C-alpha cells in the first residue's frame, strides 16, 4: 500500500490579492477547507507538497492528510483548484474534508486496451470521444483508471457507457447510451477536378464564351 501524503498547513487571517501574491512568492498558496463535521477554514499550504499529491497516480482523486497547525489533521481531497493560465501553476485550492462511508462524485479516466479488429484487419480508425467518466464511490476506493477492452471492435462498431465494467463499489454516473469508442472508415480527401492552364471550361448548350444560335439564324420579318 502506498504511503499516505501528509500536507502541513497553517490558518490564514489575511485575505485579498496582495496577501495571496506574497504567499506565492514564499512558495505557498491559499486554500479553503470545508465539508465534513467542521466549519470552513482558510489556510495556507506549501505548493510543492500539494503539487506532489497531484503528481501521484490517482492525481486529483488522491485522499491525503491535511495537518493544520493548532487544529489537527483530517483526511481531505481536492474539490477544485485554480491554475495560473500563463505559468500553468496552481494558485488556489478548495479541499473537502471526508467523512467515513461518504460517497462522492469523482472523475476517472478511461484506459482503452487492445487493438480493434476493425483497425488491424479492416483498415479502420479507432475514435475515442470520451476519455473520462463520472463515478460515485468512496474517495478511498476511487480507481486510478478504468480499463476498457476495445480489441473486439469491428468496422462501424461502437462501445457505450453501458459496456464499461466498473470495479466493485463504484457506480457509473453517465448516460448508458453514450458512445465511448468506435471504429470508423478512414476516408480519403476528395480532390477538386483540375483545369489545364489557359483552357476554357465547357459551357453546356454552345461554345465557350457565348450562347449557341439556332441553325440558319433568325428569319427576317
Image (cartoon, rainbow, N blue to C red):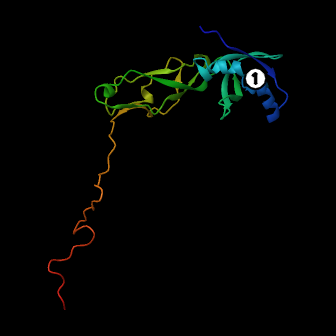
**Nearer to me, 53 or 150:** 53
At horizontal 81% and vertical 29% (from top left) the residue drawn is: 22
**Nearer to me, 78 or 208:** 208
Q: Quadrant of residue 206?
A: bottom left
Q: How many circles with numbers are drawn on the protein?
A: 1
Q: Residue furthest right?
A: 13
Q: Quadrant of residue 104?
A: top right
Q: Position of residue 148 (x, y in %)?
A: 43, 22
| Residue underneath mark 1 | 27
At horizontal 33% and vertical 34% (from top left) the residue drawn is: 156
Q: Residue furthest front?
A: 198
Q: Quadrant of residue 216?
A: bottom left
At horizontal 38% and vertical 24% (from top left) the residue drawn is: 150
Q: Position of residue 72 (x, y in %)?
A: 79, 15
Q: Is residue 140 above or below residue 21?
A: above
At horizontal 82% and vertical 31% (from top left) the residue drawn is: 19
Q: Position of residue 61 (x, y in %)?
A: 61, 22
Looking at the rendered image, the quarter that the C terminus falls into is: bottom left
Res. 16 in view: no
Amino acid at each position: 500500500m502506498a504511503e499516505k501524503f501528509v500536507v502541513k498547513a497553517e490558518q490564514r487571517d489575511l485575505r485579498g490579492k496582495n496577501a495571496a501574491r506574497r504567499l506565492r512568492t514564499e512558495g505557498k498558496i491559499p486554500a479553503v477547507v470545508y465539508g465534513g463535521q467542521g466549519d470552513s477554514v482558510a489556510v495556507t499550504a506549501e505548493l510543492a507538497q500539494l503539487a506532489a499529491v497531484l503528481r501521484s497516480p490517482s492525481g486529483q482523486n488522491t485522499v491525503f492528510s491535511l495537518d493544520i497547525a493548532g487544529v489537527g489533521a483530517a483526511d481531505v481531497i481536492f474539490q477544485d483548484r485554480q491554475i495560473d493560465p500563463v505559468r500553468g501553476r496552481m494558485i488556489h485550492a478548495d479541499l473537502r474534508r471526508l467523512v467515513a462511508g461518504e460517497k462522492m462524485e469523482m472523475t476517472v479516466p478511461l484506459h482503452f486496451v487492445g487493438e480493434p479488429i476493425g483497425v488491424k484487419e479492416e483498415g479502420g480508425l479507432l475514435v475515442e470521444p470520451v476519455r473520462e467518466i463520472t463515478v460515485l464511490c468512496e474517495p478511498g476506493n476511487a480507481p486510478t483508471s478504468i480499463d476498457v477492452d476495445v480489441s473486439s471492435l469491428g468496422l462501424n462498431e461502437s462501445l457505450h457507457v453501458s459496456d464499461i465494467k466498473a470495479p466493485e463499489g463504484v457506480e457509473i454516473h453517465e448516460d448508458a447510451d453514450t458512445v465511448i469508442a468506435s471504429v470508423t472508415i478512414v476516408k480519403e480527401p476528395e480532390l477538386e477536378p483540375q483545369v489545364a492552364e489557359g483552357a476554357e471550361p465547357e459551357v453546356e448548350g454552345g461554345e465557350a464564351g457565348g450562347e449557341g444560335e439556332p441553325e440558319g439564324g433568325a428569319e427576317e420579318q
